[in-house]
Amino acid sequence: MRNFSITLRPHGDELSCQERETVLAALLRNGYRVFYGCTGGGCGVCKMLLASGLVEHGRCSKAVLTDDERSRGYFLSCKATPVADLEIEIREINRLEKLEPVRKISCDSLE
């Protein structure tokens, strides 16, 4: 199975995306929180801008991702899968943030 690299601009963070994995799934798996809604391609909340690379758009509503938007590099992260390494322009509307890893702590019982 092939892995693709996704670079988040302007942050410069880089993460991996597995073949046939959506961009949204890769972001979540790599510990990012991002704004999204239906996960079915019908609401457009997860719309992102591709700076470079190529995605397979998957099935989504033309009402939320028009042909003009596609031609300008927009895609729905819940449906799009990479077919090459990607650079994604993160915009304020995406509300992206990196979550801190969960740390295990031990607690001594009080007696």
Image: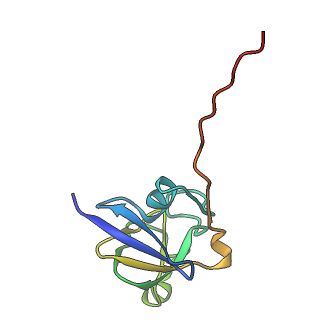
Residue 3: image x %, image y %? 28, 63
- The colour scheme of the drawn protein is rainbow
Residue 75: image x %, image y %? 47, 76
Tally of numbered tags? 0
Q: Is residue 38 left or right of residue 3?
A: right
| Residue at figure coordinates x 41%, y 68% from the top left | 80
> Foreground residue, 50 or 105?
105
Outermost residue toward the top in this view: 111
| Residue at figure coordinates x 53%, y 76% from the top left | 48
> Foreground residue, 100 or 110?
110
Q: Quadrant of residue 85?
A: bottom left
Outermost residue toward the right in this view: 111
> Foreground residue, 14 or 49?
14
Image quarter in which the C terminus is found: top right
Does 106 sit above or below residue 16?
Answer: above
Outermost residue toward the left in this view: 1
Q: Quadrant of residue 56?
A: bottom left
| Residue at figure coordinates x 44%, y 76% from the top left | 7
